Amino acid sequence: MIKHIPVLPDETIQYLAPSKNQNFIDATCGFGGHSGLILKKNGPKGRLLAIDQDKVALYVAQKNLKNFSSRVDFVQSNFTKLGLIIRSWHVPRIDGILFDLGVSTYQLKSPGRGFSFSEDSELDMRMAPEAQTLSAKEIVNSWSEKKLKEIFQKYGEEQYAGKIAQVIVKTRTQKPISTTSELVEIIKKATPPKYRTEMDKHFATKIFQALRIAVNDELKALESGLKQALQILSHGGRLVVISFHSLEDRIVKNFFRENNLEILTPKPIVASQKEIIQNPSARSAKLRVAIKNI
């Protein structure tokens, strides 16, 4: 059985505050780490709708949550379809909705997914390969230098976006760029040694993030998912969002403010040093919470 350590588990449950017979949506179920914590609190009749676009993750979640099977409904889909999915989920009210926007370690290390610069594989980065056509490989081999520079700046906030885009275009005229390791070498060639060694993250992080966001249209998807979540959330219900980079966090913060929600986290909740040591992927996690009182 594949396990995944959920980030900010105690804080998520503290702010989501599940209690007896309440109903919740985990819009990014993954392997069911957060879902399991919710289900331990909302029995004996409370229900959970578990959504994920990754069919493998959802299959594992079903195994991990088998003890709660009578109270969980699993749906393979993207949270951009939340409003549609909810039409066939018949509960009297929805007390809370959780979004965990992180990419799981399993996804990062899965052969052939192409999410990680530390695992050599085909450049893909699609969250739901069977439902998507655009891949990272297509982007780096067909998009113009101008468009590549634009997404590297906008989605990666990359200082050397222009130079990296230039080297990508030059390289692909000789042969297609097919693997993650080839892309890492291009980024290495396009950036100065001092920049690469003095960064607190791997020098390819920002470009890989930018490509993943572009492939999956993540920022527009988040905006759409939040709007639909607010529409279906019951009065007094809680919206909990865990983001992993400044672009996501900014969208969440602005959404809460613009929709007159009762904000419970004026500043985002971050992981303790103890959790970061135990689960390094929690390092960049930020949790924001708001209540729908309108």
Image: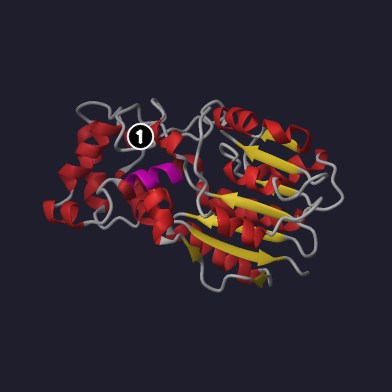
Which residues, given as a range, are shown in magenta?
A: 207-213
Vertical comparison of 70 with 199: above or below: above
- Is residue 142 in the magenta section? no
Q: Can residue 95 be seen in this view?
A: yes
Which of 289/9 is in front?
9
Instruction: Please tell me whether mark 1 sits on a helix, a strand or a loop.
Output: helix
Give the residue displayed 40% in from the left and 53% down from the top: 155
Vertical comparison of 64 with 199: above or below: above
Q: Is residue 84 visible?
A: no
Give the residue displayed 39% in from the left and 60% down from the top: 273
Residue type indicated by callout 1: Ser
- Is residue 210 in the magenta section? yes
Which of 149/56 is in front?
56
273 to the left or right of 62: left
Give the residue displayed 72% in from the left and 41% down from the top: 49
Is disc 1 surrounded by few (<14), some (14 to 19) or many (20+) residues within 10 Å?
A: some
Residue 256 sits in quarter: bottom right
Question: Can you say which quadrant of the picture contains the C terminus?
Answer: bottom right
233 to the left or right of 64: right
244 to the left or right of 55: left
Q: Where is residue 151 in the image (x, y as percent from the top left)?
A: 38, 50
Dominant secondary-structure state across the stretch colored magenta = helix
Vertical comparison of 49 with 66: above or below: below
Vertical comparison of 60 with 145: above or below: above
Q: Where is residue 182 in the image (x, y as percent from the top left)?
A: 24, 32
Q: Where is residue 186 in the image (x, y as percent from the top left)?
A: 21, 39
Q: Where is residue 43 in the image (x, y as percent from the top left)?
A: 78, 46
What residue would you read off at disc 1? 142
Can you name the residue that lies furthest to the right here? 92
